[in-house]
Amino acid sequence: MSLFVTFEGPEGSGKTTQIRLLADALRARGLDVLTTREPGGTRIGNAIRALLLDSAHTEMDPRAEALLFNAARAQIVGEVIRPALAAGRVVVCDRYADSTLAYQGYGHGQSIDALRRLGEFATGGLTPDLTVYLDIDVEAGLRRKQSQDADAEWNRMEEQTLAFHQAVRAGYLRLAGAEPDRWVVVDASQAPETVHTLIAARVLALTALQQAQIR
């Protein structure tokens, strides 16, 4: 049984923790789970990630940014995600095409329609079965991220203005509202265990439905 789940959320929303908890829960039920991330997940993708997130590249044009993100996306879809799904695995990905719509579209003001077409080309039309959006107040999320590791250097995306991050959050909520069957919005300000319970319930219901259809 293959299943494609993506996680989206602003900085400090707890995606890494929730992906780990979900993967552990699914594996405990005997499912073969692959976790990966965007940009990255492949040798080429990791090289693009380093270029994209380097704080020294302040002059990067938002169009170049969108193209680079989608180049990394095309690589991971072809090299990792599609083969895993074809093998009947559950793929859980930290960010996917919706990130580009939120960050480069709503955050940087690039054409949403153009970005959708670019994403369609990069992914070959591969859409997640479920997208989990971890919602948290922008300032609270940034404070949480900083408190987790006060000495860590922030990447170029994290260093954007507060107004940028607020526009990204509003964009995410707009995307979720437009496709309620694919998205689940979870209040990420709650305790991690509570957030996990809500996510796991939705994902397990989806796996049960798919298994019933197979039978």
Image: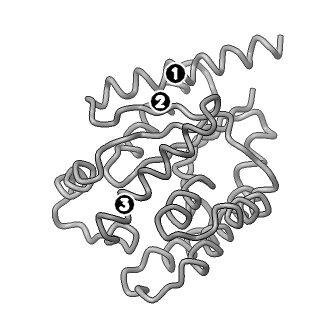
Q: Who comes first in sequence, dot 3 or dot 2?
A: 2
Q: Which residue is mark 1?
A: 28
Measured in 3D between alpha carbons, the distance from the residue under mark 1 to the one under mark 3, in whole angstroms, is 36 Å
Q: Which residue is mark 2?
A: 24
Return the residue nearer the eye: 175 or 129. Answer: 175
**Residue at the image point whose x is 82% and y is 16% from the top:** 214
The quarter in which the N terminus is drawn is: top right
Measured in 3D between alpha carbons, the distance from the residue under mark 3 to the one under mark 2, in whole angstroms, is 30 Å
- Labels 3 & 2 near each other (Cβ < 8 A): no
Q: Secondary structure at mark 3?
A: helix
Image-based side of 202 in relation to 127, left or right? left
Q: Position of residue 136 (x, y in %)?
A: 32, 43
- Labels 1 & 3 near each other (Cβ < 8 A): no
Q: Which residue is mark 3?
A: 165
Amino acid carrying label 3: it is: His
- Would you call the spot at circle 2 few (<14 residues within 10 Å), some (14-19), or many (20 or more)? few
**Residue at the image point whose x is 57% and y is 45% from the top:** 175
The quarter in which the C terminus is drawn is: top right
Q: Residue 87 sits in which quadrant?
A: top right
Q: Which mark is residue 126?
A: none
Image-based side of 65 in relation to 212, left or right? left
Q: Position of residue 94 (x, y in %)?
A: 52, 49
Q: Position of residue 168 (x, y in %)?
A: 44, 57
- Labels 1 & 2 near each other (Cβ < 8 A): yes
